[in-house]
Image (spheres, rainbow, N blue to C red):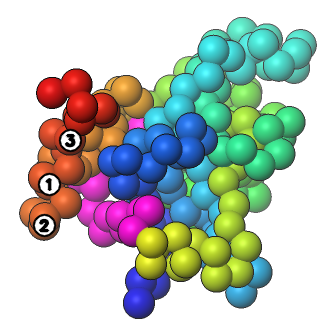
Amino acid sequence: MTIINKGDILLSEPFLQDPNFFRSVILVTEQSEQGTLGFVLNQKSNLLLEDFGEEFQNVDFPVYIGGPVEQSTLHFIHKIGNKIEDSIHVSKDWYWGGNLDLVLNLIRIGIIKESEIRFFIGYTGWSKGQLLSEFRNKSWFKINDPKVEVLTTSPEILWREILKYQETELKQYANYPINPSLN
């Protein structure tokens, strides 16, 4: 039985057809009796943070699609740690949320770099038992050590790069074509 913890990285299996999760890389930020919550790390939107209104002016960081749930909400994960008030420690270097006004000010004065933070609209969520059921159906791989820096690796190749550096049978999936019938 697969056990999911806060801070785990999940990769969708190569042929998962759900467009919300096609070759996705997810950081799990919450795991409880009620279910699991996380963010898709490699689905960039066409939006910049400054597109969200006046309070985000002069903050041209990209915004990612965190998942299909509540896409009218804005979230962020970061590696800034306790410099950001009200952040939730996820694991090792990862933190979720915190004081947004402080974050925007630190970005504007150059203390927070794009490589240290990622913004999302929406999130990914599973009700109690749902994610474990999807693991039994082999829809997801749990990655203990991605071996690549997930915030600085290009989102277009992140899924493949994580698989490429695994020391298990998962490594073989890195070269799976998107459409095997075209080979």
> Magenta part of the protein: which range?
138-151
Which amino acid does the dot numbered 2 rest on?
A: Thr
Q: Residues within 10 Å of mark 3 (few under 14, many from 20)?
A: few
SS of the residue under disc 1: helix
The answer to whether residue 160 is above or below residue 44 is below
Q: Position of residue 38 (x, y in %)?
A: 61, 57
Q: Is residue 68 magenta?
A: no
What residue is pinned by disc 1?
171
What residue is pinned by disc 3?
176
Which amino acid does the dot numbered 1 rest on?
A: Lys
Which amino acid does the dot numbered 3 rest on?
A: Tyr
The answer to whether residue 164 is above or below residue 91 is above
Would residue 27 be seen by someone viewing this image from the given angle? Answer: yes
Furthest residue toward bottom:
1
Q: Position of residue 57 (x, y in %)?
A: 79, 11
SS of the residue under disc 3: loop
Q: Is residue 141 magenta?
A: yes
Say which label, 3 or 1, has the lower sequence index: 1
- Where is residue 93, by image quadrant? bottom left
Q: Which mark is residue 153?
A: none
Q: Residues within 10 Å of mark 1 (few under 14, many from 20)?
A: some
Q: Alpha-carbon distance for marks 2 and 3?
A: 15 Å
Furthest residue toward front:
181
What residue is pinned by disc 2?
168
At horizontal 20% and vertical 41% (from top left) the residue drawn is: 176
Q: Alpha-carbon distance for marks 3 and 1?
A: 10 Å
- Which residue is more in the foreground, 173 or 58? 173
Would residue 79 be seen by someone viewing this image from the given angle? Answer: no
Say which label, 2 or 3, has the lower sequence index: 2
At horizontal 53% and vertical 32% (from top left) the residue drawn is: 43
Q: Quadrant of the N terminus?
A: bottom left
Q: Is residue 135 left or right of residue 162?
A: right
